[in-house]
Amino acid sequence: MAKKHSSFDYELLVRYMLPQGMLDYFEITKIEEEVTDEKDETGTVIRILHIYLDERDLRDKVWHDLQLSTLLSGR
């Protein structure tokens, strides 16, 4: 299965596919198209889109300095 980068603007397509408001909390970091060797019942080659998202940090400034105490205590 080969992954390829296409000139097609998949980001626009993904914006329509994702639930409304989701991109308020996540940003699209990468989209890859995978072409498989398989075909569906109509004979069309199956392609898979891998969509990578990163969560946006929407915390108030007050919360940015907080860290987990278990990480600091060396547990």
Image: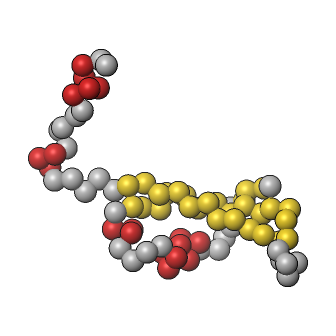
Q: How many marks?
A: 0
Quadrant location of the N terminus in the rendered image: bottom right
Please, is residue 57 above or below residue 21 in the view? Answer: above
Along the viewing direction, whichever of 6 and 24 lies nearer the viewer: 24
The quarter in which the C terminus is drawn is: top left
Residue at 47% x, 57% y is: 53
Say left or right for 45 vs 29.
right
Q: Is residue 60 left or right of residue 45?
A: left
| Residue name at image x 19 percent, y 44 percent | 64
Q: Nearer the viewer, residue 2 or 19?
A: 19
Compared with 64, 17 (above or below) is below
Quick check: 11 left or right of 62? right
Q: Position of residue 39 (x, y in %)?
A: 85, 71
Q: What is the basis of the colouring in this image?
A: secondary structure
Measuring from the top left, give residue 36's x and y in whole percent.
80, 62
Q: From the top left corner, tell me how far across and down residue 40 is, in percent.
A: 82, 74
Outermost residue on the top side: it is 74
Residue 74 drawn at (x, y percent)? 30, 17
Seen at 43% across and 54% down, the residue is 54
Q: Quadrant of residue 25?
A: bottom left
Residue at point 22% right, 34% down?
A: 67
The residue furthest bottom is 42
Residue 69 quadrant: top left
